[in-house]
Image (tube, helix red, strand yellow):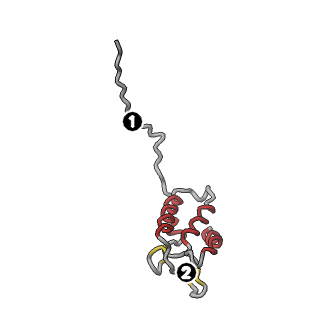
Amino acid sequence: MGLYTETRYEPLHDHAFERKKTKFWDPETTLDIINPDRGTLTCVGYAPSCRRRCRNLINQYNRESAHHLLDKLSYINVATTNIDADLYELARLTLCQRYHQDQARSMVRQWN
């Protein structure tokens, strides 16, 4: 004689573990990521020959990665957290590969 018991698992709804995300800031606006001349994300580097921001497009993978990183950054309280490493990564993603990758550190300084 076997005893059969059915076990029912109910999902736990422990609200202590559910965290509401709060955006602390808008890095896209604060860091001037969108080129106002183009209305889209172009290289954030400076083109000294033209005396203006570079207008080269950023490849799709880097653009998508940059938008993902910008979203992540918006949830970080920059008053209490150092984000220099993230800003450096953002600079590398938003500087054109051909001309302005060498400006990554100066972009981080400018953004700070």
Q: Position of residue 97 (x, y in %)?
A: 56, 74
Q: Which of 108 and 102 is in front in this view?
A: 102
Query: Of all residues shown, which one is farthest toward the bottom?
Result: 49
Which amino acid, mark 1? Pro
Give me the C-alpha separation between circle 2 and circle 1.
53 Å
Reading the image, the residue beneath label 2 is 53
Quadrant the C terminus occupies: bottom right
Residue at 56% x, 56% y: name it.
Answer: 77
Residue at 51% x, 58% y: name it.
Answer: 72
Residue at 47% x, 52% y: name it.
Answer: 21
Which amino acid, mark 2? Arg
Tags 2 and 1 touching, CB below 8 Å? no
Reading the image, the residue beneath label 1 is 11
Q: Is residue 3 above or below residue 92?
A: above
Quadrant the N terminus occupies: top left
Q: Position of residue 4 (x, y in %)?
A: 34, 19
Residue 9 image-quadrant placement: top left
Residue 70 left/right relative to 82:
left
Q: How would you rate the neighbour count of disc 1 (Cα within 10 Å): few for under 14, some for 14-19, many for 20 or more?
A: few
Residue 35 left/right relative to 102:
left
